[in-house]
Structure formats: structure tokens, C-alpha cells
Amino acid sequence: MSIALDRAPKPTPQDAIALARRKWLRGESVDMGALATELDTSRATLYRWVGSRERLIGEALWSLFSEIFEEGKARASGSGAALIHQVFEHGLRTMGASPAMRAFIARDPEYALRVLTSKASVVQGRAIAAFRDLIAEQPGYTHPLDPDTLAYLTVRIAESFLYTDVITGGEPDLDKAVAALAVMLGTEPK
């Protein structure tokens, strides 16, 4: 006869991402050694799961951004350019108002931009894919640019204005980003 022992479930890569996300949202450092200890696993296992600290933070941020994106889609009305614009504005303003985002960028601006905007970035690549899919889902919507290019430019507009302080030293101006996308999409600028 075997006796069932109450054992905590083994941690998973998703647990690591969720823990990193909670720490990031609280403005805490995402230290791989501390995460491994908290997850009751080894550093080697944690690195095998997520690849690198940069990748882990990117995955944690994407988990947050994807929820914001879906929330924007759920709140948007209409279709076509107007809907795309509403989703963009919701995401931009939500992230622009995030104290955790501002703190992350202030702590190490170059690192933050690498995690958020580099060609290897989980966040940027998935944001472009999400906007490309959103554009393609709009029945009857056409634009002179192909969906891949339009999605790329949409994300780059957000990045350019959201991270202006790091890129050019100016203050982030989300109203200009919203207006710039309106012009590109051919919707009514605010």
C-alpha cells in the first residue's frame, strides 16, 4: 500500500515568468539566483527554462503587454483603422502610466531598451505579430502598406514616443504618438 504525500507541485517555466512579472511590477530586481531559490530549483534549471535574464524579463513583460493588448481589443469599438487606433492608444497610455515601466527604464535605460525594443526582443517581436494579426482580422480593411510593415511601424511609433526620454532626451509625448498613428492609419487625429 502506498501513502500519498502532500508535495508541492514542481515549479515550471511559467512559474518563473509569473514570479518575474510580480517582482517587476513591484519594482524589485529580477535576480536569477534569488528567483531560483524562491522557486526551489537550481539556477541551471532556471536558465535552461528561460535562456537568460533578459529573455525572462521579456517574457514577463510580454505576459503583461498581451493582457493589455487583449483588454484594448475588448474595449475597442468599430472595426478597421478606428479599432486598430483604439487598441494602440489603450496600450500606449496604459504602459505610459505604469510606474513599474518608468522605474524599469530609469534604473538602466539601455538594458530596458534592449529588453523592450531590440531585434531579438520577445516584446517587440510579439507586439508586431499581435498588431499584424489585428490588422489582418479587420474585414475589408486595406492600407497602402502591407500588414507586416504597418504593424512594424505601429510598434515603432509607440516605442519612439513612449521611450523618448531614453532615445532623444525629450519627454515622452503620448498625444503625439496617438496623432502620428492616426495620420498613418488615416483616422481622425485627436
Image (cartoon, rainbow, N blue to C red):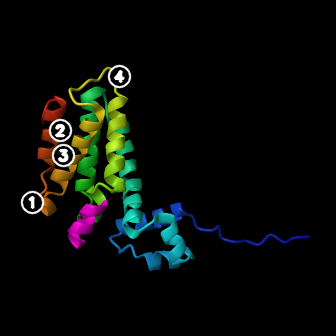
Crowding near pointer 4: few (<14 within 10 Å), some, many (20+)?
few
**Residue indicated by mark 4:** 139
Q: Which of marks 1 and 4 is in front?
A: 1
Question: Cβ–Cβ below 8 Å for labels 2 and 3?
Answer: yes
Q: Quadrant of residue 7?
A: bottom right
What label sits on residue 128 in the rendered view?
Answer: none
How much space separates mark 4 and mark 2, taking CA atoms?
20 Å
Identify the mark nearer the N-term, 1 or 2: 1
Picture coordinates of residue 187 (x, y %)?
A: 17, 29
Secondary structure of the residue carrying numbered label 2: helix
**Residue indicated by mark 1:** 168
Secondary structure of the residue carrying numbered label 1: loop
Left or right of 25 on screen, residue 178: left
Q: Can residue 123 be seen in this view?
A: yes
Q: What residue type is labelled 1?
A: Thr
**Residue indicated by mark 3:** 157
Return the residue nearer the eye: 71 or 80.
80
Left or right of 70 on screen, residue 175: left
Secondary structure of the residue carrying numbered label 3: helix
**Residue indicated by mark 2:** 181
* Region of the chain picked out in magenta, as a range: 104-115
Indicate whether 57 appears above or below 5: above
